[in-house]
Image (tube, coloured by chain):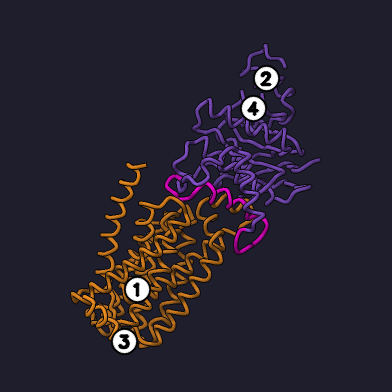
Chain colours: A purple, B orange
Amino acid sequence: MKLIDCQNVYMNYDSTKAVNGVSFSVDSGDFLCIVGENGTGKSTLLKGILGLQKVNSGTITFTGIVNKEIGYLPQKTAVQKDFPASVREVVLSGCQSRGFRLFYTSADRKKAQKNIELLGIDGIKNKPFNELSGGQQQRVLLARALCATDKLLLLDEPTTGLDPFVTAELYRIVDELNKKHGVAVVMVTHDLKNSVQYANKILCMEHDGDFFGTVDEYMKTPAARMIFGGGTNA
Amino acid sequence: MLDTFIQMFSYSFMLRAVIVGVLVALCSALLGVTLVLKRYSMIGDGLSHVGFGALCLALAMNVAPLAISVPVVVIAAFLLLRISENSKIKGDAAIALISSTALALGIIVTSMTTGINSDVNGYMFGSILAMSTTDVYVSIILSAFVLVLYVVFYNKIFAVTFDENFARATGTKTGMYNTLVSLLTAITIVIGMRIMGAMLISSLIIFPALTSMRVCRSFKSVVVTSAIVSIICFFIGLFISFAFSMPAGASVVAVNAITFGIFSILGIAKRKLS
């Protein structure tokens, strides 16, 4: 089932063109990695999908979900560095997508607790968020994102600043959410190696044209051959 | 000391100052946590200068101070927020522009009419004599408005403060909540600056939040602690001001500064021990 369909999307970053006629789609169960050089509009495109930034032309269509049912893992902000908040408070704040409510219901609390356990952060749920390691923080933000959705996760460069071990661990967690729990994943990343290992689809955004297709198709493109070597003709 | 304490409450003007002051201390502490975390501390300072200008205008026109200053400061709050969101003009510079312009206007209007008299001095540095009975009622209603809205929107305010992009992506109207916070801040500042003075009111917003953040590590505990710290500091400050005949606003700020120092040491000790 198709979740998102983007057709010929154009977007600006400040006043320069960032996204130039991108077309792709996300089906339920997909693990799509958006790769490409800096400045090719990957994060801007993500913001367009989330409705955080205006799309100049083209269409983004949602079927089966509404756009506030997307779980979003944003890039870290400067505010969060010294923000006093416990892990539980952060995860619970994901439970707000269903309109206005005065306080969290017991269903919200249960959902938050379920996701805390799912991501293995039960032992640190009363700890302050800003004192956690980078990997632990990403788990907390993933748990928060899962409170907002069980259908689609959008991750914006989640492994930036993480060491290789923690990066591998994060990919394993996201992969498990995708395969075992059926959450579709869209991830913006610079990490090509892990992308082709875990994803089933690749959107490669380059200044001279985009590629969208399955990982197998991507590996046959000249760009991928240049990076991975001609031998890996998967 | 107990005698002085009882004596303090025997004056009706002191009682009015205590009522309004405690309410303002509470409101500003709550809003302060959000403002400090969002790096909007200077908005409080800017608004108080605009408030000063408005009060001078009200004095010159001989109308009720709150009737003029509440709408003017609210409008200024909207403007400042819009400017802060606009990346082309840097927020802090814009605040400095607006606040010094408002201050200048206030002084020009004053010099053309009454001159710098004790009323204007009171607006600058605060006066516990400033509150009339009507002012007290208006202040109680406005503070209640601030408190109720803050409690009702507490979870949303947390979400928007912690991660505006995530909140927007999950369907929260973040613009509305930012506007709400600046509206509540504007009201709190206008009420509080009568006692604390235009030059000193912003400390009431910034100090309690920073003080509680030295020790507390969750959002809820920071909010609750800063509310308690703020009220206690105001009370002690007012008492000192009464007992030693010192200006109220300055005494409250001094007590806040000392408390900040104590909490900083406590925070360091807490981290060393854990």
Give the secondary structure at mark 4: helix
Q: Nearer the viewer, mark 3 or mark 2?
A: 3
- Which of disc 2 and disc 4 is earlier in sequence? 4
| Magenta span dominant secondary structure | loop
Which three-letter amino acid code belongs to the residue tagged 1?
Answer: Met
Which quadrant is home to the C terminus of chain A? Answer: top right
The percent position of residue B104, horizontal first and vertical second, equals 30, 71
Which three-letter amino acid code belongs to the residue tagged 3?
Answer: Ser
C-alpha gap between disc 3 and disc 2: 85 Å
Tag of residue A222: 2
Q: Is residue A22 above or below residue B57?
A: above
The chain under label 3 reads B
- Circles 1 and 2 on the same subunit: no
The chain under label 2 reads A
Residue linked to disc 3: B12
Residue linked to disc 1: B193
Q: Residue furthest right?
A: A1
Is mark 4 in CB contact (under 8 Å) with mark 1? no
